[in-house]
Image (tube, rainbow, N blue to C red):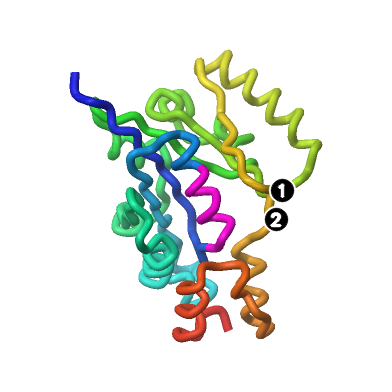
Amino acid sequence: MDEITRIGIYCGTFAPIHNGHVNAAKAFMDQMQLHYLFVIPTALDPSKIRDEGDEARHRMKMCELAFEGEAGVVIIDMEIEKGGISYTVDTLRALAREDRRLFMLVGTDMALKLDSWREPEEIFKLCYPTYVRRESDKLLENQIIEKNTKYLNDYGKICRRIMTPEIELSSTEIREMVKRGEDISDLVPEKVAEYIKENKLYL
């Protein structure tokens, strides 16, 4: 049998991508021993675009800049090209191969809702879900334990935790900081900060 390729799937709006995303992605690659990481910016409803920085071309470019030179990281525009609502199960089906083992990275909020997504049984069948904590709320621990017990009973898998420092950081915060003229250089990769400034995004 051919060697199995371990591929990570990391979807998000990434508007903009920040250090929390990048750190989580690197920890995901390391701890799940991935051969490749597919970073997949999601499509946005044109009616919900708040700023030029939300446009696909800018979000794609910022992801490329954030992971420039990182071996094994591939930025993929499949959900943007498809347009409309992207269901995770469809993305996983499109990427599934007999010689691939898929892993998916989500945040805590999404990890607690996986059973409410479209075709959750198929999602758990197609991939190994993982999550990263970006908040320090200890009350969530019991919720995660309860959900993992349910996932194990219902789907035969749990959502495994990727260990990273808990850094409470959001793209929304960063957009607001840019609008207020505050320095974001410690919050996003250097080239992303330069790109936002050069293209006057989020002003």
Residue at coordinates 33% horizontally, 48% vertically from top-left?
Answer: 72
Residue at coordinates 45% horizontally, 84% vertically from top-left?
Answer: 199
Q: Callout 1 environment at 10 Å: few (<14), some (14 to 19), or many (20+)?
A: some
Work out whether 173 lies above or below 138: below
- Find the residue positioned furthest to the right: 139
Which residue is under mark 1?
135
Task: Confirm whether the magenta stretch covers residue 44.
Answer: no
Range drawn in magenta: 18-27
Which numbered disc flags the more N-terminal residue, 1 or 2?
1
Residue at coordinates 62% horizontally, 44% vertically from top-left?
Answer: 164
Which residue is under mark 2?
168
Quadrant where the C terminus is found in the figure: bottom right
Picture coordinates of residue 141, whole percent (x, y): 74, 32
The total of numbered circles placed on residues is 2
Q: Callout 2 environment at 10 Å: few (<14), some (14 to 19), or many (20+)?
A: few
Q: Are discs 1 and 2 less than 8 Å apart at CB? A: yes
> From the viewer's perspective, is 85 left or right of 152?
left
Work out whether 98 lies above or below 198: above
Work out whether 164 lies above or below 53: above
